Image: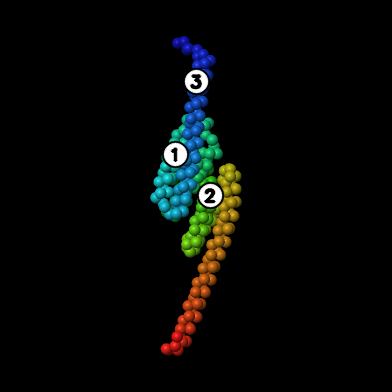
Amino acid sequence: MVCRVMSLSEILNNIRELALKKDGLRQEIQVIARRTTRLSKQAIFLTHRDRIEEAENLLKEAGANLSRLAEISKLHLDLFYTGLVDSAFEEYAEAQIFLGLIKNGRFLGPSDINVPDEAYALGLADVIGELRRRALDLIRRGDIEGAERCLDIMETIYTELIGCDELLILIPGLRRKCDTGRRVIEATRGDVTTEARRMVLNNLMRELQRTLESRIDYGREPGRG
C-alpha cells in the first residue's frame, strides 16, 4: 500500500487546525475556571447569610464545571494553565468544606467533593478565614457560644494541618496559608475573649442595678412616691 505524500501546504494546514482547536479548548478552560471560582465565592457569601439551599445550587453548577475540566484534562493535559485551574479547585473546596461545617457540623473529605488532595488541603486552610468572618458575625448578634465554636473549629483545622509536616513541605503555599491562619486565629481569640468579658461585665452591672432598684423600692414608705 502506497501512502500519499502530503504537501507542505497540507502539513501546515493540519497543524493550523490543531492549533486552533487547542486554542479554543484553552479559552474554554479559562472561562470554566473563572466561572467556577466566581460561583464558589458566591456560595461562600450565601453560606454566611445562611442561605444554604442557594449555596448548594451554585456549588452543583461549579461541580459540573469542574467535571468538564476533568474531561478535557484527560485528553489535553498540556493545555491547562495550572494557576487558574488550581485556584478554581481550591476555591470550590473551600466553599464545600465551609458549607459542610455550617450545615452539618462535619468535615467533608476530598472524595466527598471530588477535588484533588492538594486543592483540598489548600482550600481547608482558607476556611479558617471564613470561620473568623462567621465568628465576628455571631459576636455582633450576641452569640458568643457560636463564635467560640467557630474558634474551636479554626484551631482544629490549624492544629491538624500543622501536624502534617510532610504536607507543609510538599504542597506549595500551604505553610504560608497556615501562618496566615495562625494570625487569624489569634485575632479571633482576642475578639471572642474581649466580647465574652464585656458581656459578663454587662450582666453583672445589670444584676447590680436590679438589686439596687429592689432595695430602693423595698425601702420606700407606703403612700410616698
Q: Residue at x 47, y 41 (%)?
A: 36
Residue drawn 46% across and 53% down? 48
Which image quadrant is residue 185 in? bottom right
Q: At 52% from the left edge and 56% from the top edge, which residue is drawn? A: 132
Gap between marks 1 and 2, in whole Å? 21 Å
Instruction: Give SS at disc 1.
Output: helix
Q: Earlier in the sequence, mark 1 or mark 2?
A: 1
Q: Position of residue 176 (x, y in %)?
A: 60, 48
* CA distance for labels 1 and 3: 30 Å
Q: Quadrant of the N terminus?
A: top left
Which disc is residue 57 wearing?
A: none
User: Which quadrant would the C terminus be assigned to in this image?
Assistant: bottom left
The color scheme shown is rainbow
The amino acid beneath tag 2 is: Asp
Label 2, on which residue? Answer: 126
Check if mark 3's residue and mark 2's residue have beta carbons within 8 Å.
Answer: no
User: Could you tell me if residue 88 is visible in this image?
Assistant: yes
Marks 3 and 2, how far apart in space? 45 Å
Q: Position of residue 3 (x, y in %)?
A: 47, 12
According to the picture, the residue beneath numbered tag 3 turns out to be 14
Sequence-first tag of 1 and 3: 3
Eyeballing the image, is 39 above or below 71?
A: below
Q: Amino acid at mark 3?
A: Asn
User: Foreground residue, 32 or 177?
Assistant: 32
Q: Position of residue 206 (x, y in %)?
A: 49, 74
To which residue does mark 1 refer? 65
Q: Position of residue 26 (x, y in %)?
A: 50, 32
Q: Are marks 1 and 2 in contact (CB under 8 Å)?
A: no
Sequence-earlier tag: 3 or 2: 3
Type of amino acid under label 1? Asn
Check disc 3 and report its element: helix, strand or loop.
Answer: helix
